[in-house]
Amino acid sequence: MNTKINLSIVAFGLLATTNSTFATDWEDLEISASVAATSNYVWRGNTQSESRPAIQGAFDFDYTLFETDGFLKDAGVFLGVWASSIDKTVAGGKNSLEVDIYGGLSGTLDVGMDIGWNAGWLRYQYPGAATSTGSNFDEVFAGIDIAPWDVLSLDFTAYFGVEVDNTINWGNYYDANIGFSPLAGLADDDPASFLKSFTISGHFGHYDRTKDGTGDNYVDWKIGVAQDILGVTTEIAYWDTDLHNDEGENQRPIYMVTFSKSF
């Protein structure tokens, strides 16, 4: 599951010394949606669809609480739901749907350059599973994202497993991503301006599962390229891990293609 994510509420104490404009109407509410079709739903390096295609979609609601001209430039709340078809055995039964619900706080810090932050709660749910205990699970998350140049973006998010209503704690996951768009600076009237959206991306993750004792710690990594074509983003990616199969051999890498569109 992919979603925006990042940092702390302490910064709200700075509001007393900044010139703030607080949200007062629904113009500060932003609603967005996305749909995607992928050849393989991969989560943290592992297929969730038995290497088969999956359909995915999301709705997101973002509400701006305030905007300032100080260190804490803006902040708001967000709430969203994301769903995907899956093909996976969950809690002793075969399941075909995952629904994730998430929400939290987000904003921007001005430290000479903008640093985005967000923090919140994420629940993974598997409707139709044999039992919710051992299938549904929860995480809290916090992260930051920066774009030091127009062509480069970086983000880091930490997810911490928590137990709620006897759900399982799958451990902690640390997620780092980089995006490079070498032609982002092209003028709109440039003949090659359609390549402004071309992006090379990289991902590295570490799953610490020492708390649950049900699986090995592992790392996963991904390399991909993406391009907007007629309003649809096409991504081709390679994903791998250092996990081993039952015979002690490295798991096979995953090659996938995804088509997505945001509204």
Image (cartoon, helix red, strand yellow):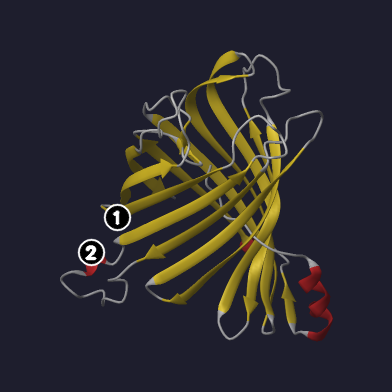
| Pick the front one: 168 or 240 | 240
Going by the numbered disc 2, the residue's amino acid type is: Phe
| Residue at position x 67%, y 36% in the image | 170
Q: Residues within 10 Å of mark 2 (few under 14, many from 20)?
A: some
Q: Is residue 156 above or below residue 241?
A: below
| Pick the front one: 48 or 19 | 48
Q: Which residue is tagged 1?
A: 228
Mark 1 or mark 2: name the one nearer the start of the chain. 2
| Pick the front one: 28 or 199 | 199
Q: Position of residue 232 (x, y in %)?
A: 31, 49
**Mark 1, secondary structure of its residue:** strand
Q: Is residue 257 above or below residue 247?
A: below
**Mark 2, secondary structure of its residue:** helix
Going by the numbered disc 1, the residue's amino acid type is: Asp
Q: Residue furthest left?
A: 191
| Residue at position x 80%, y 35% in the image | 164
Q: Residue furthest front?
A: 248
Q: Position of residue 61 (x, y in %)?
A: 61, 51
Q: Residues within 10 Å of mark 1 (few under 14, many from 20)?
A: some
Q: Is residue 200 visible?
A: yes
CB under 8 Å between callouts 1 and 2? Answer: yes
